[in-house]
Image (cartoon, rainbow, N blue to C red):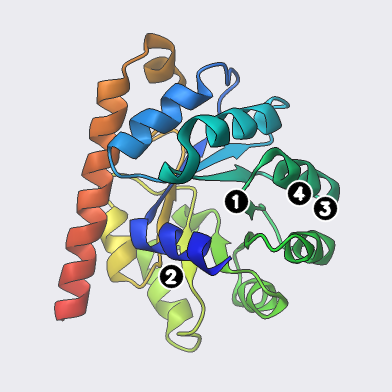
Amino acid sequence: MAETLGRIVAGGVVAVVRLDDLARAVDVARALVAGGVEAVEYTFTNRSAADAIARARDALGATAVIGAGSVLDPETARVAILAGAEYVVTPAYKAATVEMCHRYGVPIICGALTPTEILTAWEAGSALVKVHPASLGGPAYFKDILAPMPMVRLVPSGGVTFENVGAFIAAGAAAVALGGQLVDPRTVAAGAWDALTERATTLRRSVRLARERRDAA
């Protein structure tokens, strides 16, 4: 668990792959990894997500950290883990899902929004807490939340853009999660893998520079 979590935080970017067609899931992951984004999350809004996870794990091995997103219940978490998911992301806190992930030794990232929800998920064992939709409060909200709860590691999702990534990191986010801003259906359908790699490279650079400025402040 510690190694997986360490790689996610070190990379600073989680790519959320929410597509209607996951036939090219492996190509997507390869392009992202080429740009330095190792954490790739396939969401269970697509019933082929488990298959995509298994194929990506087989194809990329240790070069990527493959996860499952939009996991609503412990049964889905178990399916994802057995398919090879190295971490599980939920839209909201559910104790039974946390318990299932801990049983298999897989880190879970629970979704939350309010201070109470965030602290509840953290105390229950959520390795990171996904704040969604982050667009509601923006980076300033993260700074306000972390002032009394500096031990919580937060990941903004929903509303993260190329323009505000640095602001979220500066406000204390442990990492950021991007979906359609990073992996969109049109780019995937066109097989524009160089474009996807370039986006990943840009995001990683933004995270690195924001961390350097934050640490120097």
* Mark nearer the N terminus (1 vs 4): 4
State left or right for residue 54 relative to residue 146.
right
Q: Position of residue 83 (x, y in %)?
A: 70, 38
What residue sits right under mark 4 in the picture?
77
> Which residue type carries mark 3?
Pro
Residue 75, image x, y percentages: 85, 47
Rendered view: 151 above or below 14: below
| Residue tagged 1 | 86
Q: Quadrant of the N terminus?
A: bottom right
Q: Residues within 10 Å of mark 3 (few under 14, many from 20)?
A: some
User: Where is 185 relative to 38, above or below?
Assistant: above
**Which amino acid type corresponds to the residue marked 4 in the rendered image?**
Ala
Judging by the rendered image, the residue that carries numbered circle 3 is 74
Q: Are marks 4 and 3 in contact (CB under 8 Å)?
A: yes
Figure quadrant of residue 29 = top left
Helix or strand or loop: what does disc 4 sit on? helix
N-terminal of the pair, mark 3 or mark 2, is 3
Where is mark 2, residue-wise? 141
Return the disc, 4 or 2, that comes first in the chain's sequence.
Answer: 4
**Mark closer to the observer (1, 4):** 1
Real-space Cα separation, disc 1 to disc 2, in angstroms: 29 Å
User: What is the distance, in whole Å, between disc 3 and disc 2 at their CAs?
Assistant: 30 Å
Q: Amino acid at mark 1?
A: Glu
Which dot, 1 or 2, sits closer to the camera? 1
Q: Are marks 3 and 2 in contact (CB under 8 Å)?
A: no
State left or right for residue 36 relative to residue 118: left
Q: Which label belongs to residue 150?
A: none
Q: Are marks 3 and 1 in contact (CB under 8 Å)?
A: no
Q: Gap in Å between the C-alphas at discs 1 and 4?
A: 11 Å
Question: Crowding near pointer 2: few (<14 within 10 Å), some, many (20+)?
Answer: some
